[in-house]
Each structure stands twice: as structure tokens, then as C-alpha cells.
Amino acid sequence: MSALQPNQEAITAWFRTQARDLPWRNTSPWGVMVSEFMLQQTPVRRVLPRWEAWLERWPQPADLAQSSLAEAIRAWENLGYPRRAKRLHESATIITQTFNGQVPNSFAELRTLPGVGEYTANAILAFAFGQRSMVMDVNIRRLLARAWLGQSHQSPAISSIERALAIELLPLGDQDAASWAAASMELGALVCTAREPLCSKCPIVNDCNWFSQGQPISEIPRKSQKRYEGSIRQERGRILKLLRNAEHPVKIFDLAELAPDHNQFETALTQLLREGMVHENNIGYSLPNS
DNA sequence: AAACCGGGGGG
DNA sequence: CCCCCAGGTTT
């Protein structure tokens, strides 16, 4: 049995008529960068209003760099993973101080920014600068695994086979490659969804190796899902106790003493900000080693 | 490469 | 309760 070869042109043609009108598809490099930070592990629908507000308030990296971290965390609202707000704020500062206020347009420079990994760097290159780059998000992985490889699930890490396939499918021209990234991602997000894919609406249903084999279900790799609510409650208690017992208004939280675990501290602090139990004038805090 | 991190919403 | 979301960082 020879494997089917899904038609990439059918996907880009589908994209031209069915793509969502997302605001970060026609914006500045900074707008793209903000969207990519917000979209890390967060659905498009929930990002949209916060992205609009963020770009209106901080149209350029230097604008965000001039605001406090506390304001950035507050504007993040309930997007989740508040560490991303901190990383975005730090990145804006680095861009302002080191890159003349402009989002860098090379992979190596982008990777120096906190919160920019392989995916985000390539996504910024493709979507902000129209460069040919291998963009592999969860949607594209799923589409390639199903349609090209006939597999229902992927291993936790990107395999060499997936990587080679993604590179092989990348069109040669810069703009064509960037368009392919957007189109394949959109098809994965709207049609080739994780649960209940809409195969009847798929432009490559007849070329899909997974569909043609009857959508076989392979073993699902389970990711550990540990919970740390208890630790977060503990951090909340420490923060509130410090505020309550302070003889003077607390201006600096020294994380080195207050919070051995930065992530849980940030989570707890974000909760308290949202609940109005901590006010931004009181939360300038310093970080050790960063 | 594998382990760790651990927000929020939908089904 | 389990699963998913346009991942990143650390070891």
C-alpha cells in the first residue's frame, strides 16, 4: 500500500476562503510577538480581547517596558500561566535596551528573549517577517501526523520523522512558506481538531492517510498531571501574612526569602491581584538571578 | 531527549 | 473528573 500524498495546494486554497480574520494576521512584529506569547497553551478565543487591549495600551515594546511588571500581570487577567506576562515584560525591556526597540528578525536573536522557544521564534519569523521557517505547533503536528503519517497521536517530543516531514513540506519561497504555516495551522485548529475532527469539511479528506485507514486510534501517551494547589495556597498565606505583619508598607517582595518557588509565587500573587487583596502600588518585587 | 512546570475552560 | 490549548525551561 502506497501512502497517500495530501495536497498542500488544497489546504492553502481552503485557507484563502475559510481562514478566521484574526487581528494578529495584519499587525506589527510586536503585535505578532504579543499574540504568540498569549497563545502559548491558550485558545484563540480567550486571547482575542486581551490582545486588543494590550496592543492599545502598549503599542510598542518600549511602552510596555515603561510600565511596571505589576501592571503587565494585571493586564494579563485570567489568560493563565502568568509567568508569560513576566517573560513578555522582560522581553520588552531587552528589546528596548538591546535591539533599539525593534523586535529582532533572526532566529538566534529571538531565542535570547525569555519566553521565546523554538516554536515562538519560528512563528515570529514567519508571521511577522514573512520568512521561511519551520513552524511546528500542536495543530500542525496533529495535521501532519494524521494526514501524512496516518497516526492519531504523537509522542510528547517532536520526532526526527516529524521534523523531516515538516521541512520537506515547507515551500521554497519565503511568502509561500509563511502562508503554508498559517494555512496548515488553521486547518488543524478548525477542522483537524483534537476531538471530533470535521473530516467531512476537510479539503484533503480523500488524501488523508489517517481517514483512509479508518481513523485508527493508537496508544495515547499520558502526560503526568500533578497538582500544586496546596503549594499555591501556602504561597498565598505567606504573601498575606507578610502584608499583614509589615510595620511599613511593603514595597519589595524579595523572592529569595519569600518564595523558594517562583512559579507558585507568581500564581498566588496573580490570584491576589485579581481578587483586589494586593494593590499594584505594593507589589514591585525583585527577582534573584534575573 | 526527558522531566518538570501547573492556568483556565470545555466536555 | 479528564482533556485540550498557535509551549518554555531546565536537567
Image: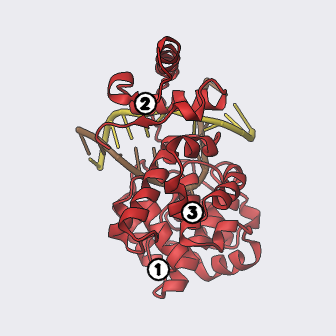
Chain colours: A red, B yellow, C brown
Q: Nearer the viewer, residue A38 or A60?
A: A60
A288 versus A110 height, above or below: above
- Front position among marks 2 and 1: 2
Q: Chain of mark 2?
A: A
Which residue is at the far front? Answer: A248
Which residue is at the far bottom? Answer: A173
Indicate the secondary structure of the residue bearing disc 2.
Answer: loop
Q: Looking at the image, which residue is at 46% across and 27% down?
A: A226
For disc 3, the marked residue is A143
Mark 2 in CB contact with mark 3 (< 8 angstroms)? no
Q: Is residue A99 visible?
A: yes
Whole-number angstrom distance, CA of label 3 to CA of label 1:
22 Å
Kind of residue at badge 1: Gln
For disc 2, the marked residue is A252
Q: Chain of mark 1?
A: A
Q: Nearer the viewer, residue A167 or A55?
A: A55
